[in-house]
Structures are given as structure tokens and as C-alpha cells.
Image: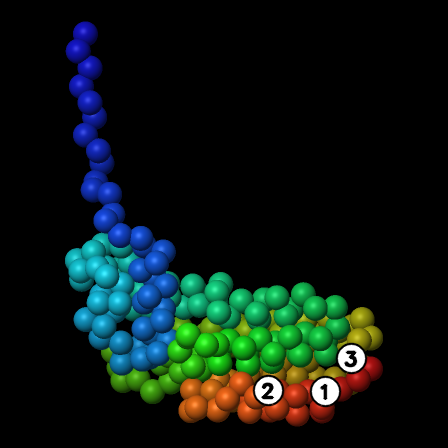
Amino acid sequence: METRKRAPIGRPRGFDADEALEQAMRVFWEQGYEGAGLTDLTGAMGITRTSMYAAFGNKEELFRKALERYTEGPASYAARALREPTARQVATAFLDGSVRATTRPGCPSGCLGVQGALAVGDPGRNARDALVAWRNDAVLVLRDRFQRAVDEGDLPPDADSGLLARYLMTVANGIAVQAAGGATRDDVQQVADMALHSWPSA
């Protein structure tokens, strides 16, 4: 009995989707959501618009995927910082990570999560909202970690875990803005160090 070869389902992608997403992330990081045109994105990704839409969806969906990649890559210091044994070490690792990520040689300066969609019109509203949620989520996980530190006696009983989390995020965001404006790693590291001088002790 003759057996027929089954035709392949779909056509294999002619590009590395992981590398394409890495390049898209860098374009959004450097130019922001609205500043990154489709020509910029597809040029950096090395693919056609048709391939981009097929693999990643529209520009907004691509931005969300790029933000996920940023969170797992350049911004992964935040998750690592939460695992430090004391609240002060969490804060130190968080700010040190922010300094390194926003001033890394060979990468755009600043932070995709801070500058990506700060000033956008209606077409970029969803991207802006995604970044607001991204930053708020970071504050919440920091707050929960600092509340644990209060409960364990690592922070004073009257320490406001929510305020400490917001303070740390505000300093980190400011570091990103300064770095994007040309401040050196030493400049923003001094800011991080000064912020930690006022950290409460149990």
C-alpha cells in the first residue's frame, strides 16, 4: 500500500523570533512607543511587516511582548532583589540594579518601563497604561516584601511598607530619567547611595 507524505503544516519561520523580539525591545527602549515606527521596528528585526504581524501581532502586542522580555532580561534585577535576606539589602540590590540597567554600555540609556510611553497621544494610551500597571506591580511586590520585613522585625514596627516601596520606586525612576539625560553611572550611583542613607533600621 502506497503511503503519502503528509505536507508540512504552515511554513517554517525564516527568522529567529527570539532575536527579532530582542531587537524590537531595544528600539522601543531607545525611541519609546510612539517614536518607534513600524519601519524602525521591522528594519531592526530584519523582517517584513507581514512577518511581524504574523509572529507578534500588531505594534501594541509587540510592545507588550518586548516589555515582558525587558522584565525578564535587563530589569530582572528587580525580582532578584526581592530574594535578598533583609529589607536594606533588597533596597540596595534594587537601586544598584537600576543603576546598572539604565547605564549599561551598548544598551539604550534609561529604562524602557519608565520612558517607554510617558508622553503619548490616544494611539499610545494602551501602551502607557501597560507601563503604569508594570510600575505599580513593582511597587506592590516591594510593599509586600517590606511588610514581611516589618512582621519579622527586620524593619521598625511603625515603618510604612507602602511608602518605602513608593520611595524606592520613585528613586529608581528618577535614576532612569537622569541616566537617559546623560548622567554617568557614577552620578546615579551617588544618588542611590544617598537614598539608602535614610533607610530605616529596626
Residue that appears at 66% across and 92% down: 194
Horizontal relation, residue 43 to residue 75: left or right: left
Quadrant location of the N terminus in the rendered image: top left
Tell me the tag on residue 17.
Answer: none
Residue 107 in sight:
yes
In the image, 194 versus 166, the foreground residue is 194
- The residue sitting at the top extreme is 1
Residue of label 3? 155
Which numbered disc, 2 or 3, marks the residue closer to the eye? 2
Marks 2/1: CA–CA distance: 16 Å
Q: Amino acid at mark 2?
A: Gln
Residue 181 position in % (x across, y down):
42, 91
Q: Is residue 77 left or right of residue 199?
A: left
Q: Pointer 1: residues within 10 angstroms few (<14), some, or many (20+)?
A: some
Residue at screen point 19% across, 30% down: 7
Q: Residue at x 21, y 33 (%)?
A: 8
Q: Nearer the viewer, residue 126 or 45?
A: 45
The three-letter code of the residue at mark 3 reads: Leu
The earlier-in-sequence mark between 2 and 1 is 2
Q: Secondary structure at mark 3?
A: loop
> Which residue does the numbered mark 2 point to in the structure image?
189
Judged from the image, the secondary structure of the residue bearing numbered disc 1 is loop
Q: Which residue is mark 1?
A: 199
Could one spot residue 163 in this view of the protein?
no
Callout 3–callout 1 Cβ contact below 8 Å: no
The residue that appears at 71% across and 91% down in the rendered structure is 198
Quadrant of the image containing the C terminus: bottom right
In the rendering, at what x and y percent does residue 144 appear? 66, 72
Q: Percent x, y for residue 164?
A: 66, 84
Q: Compare marks 3 and 1 and give the one earlier in the sequence.
A: 3
Looking at the rendered structure, the kind of residue marked 1 is Trp
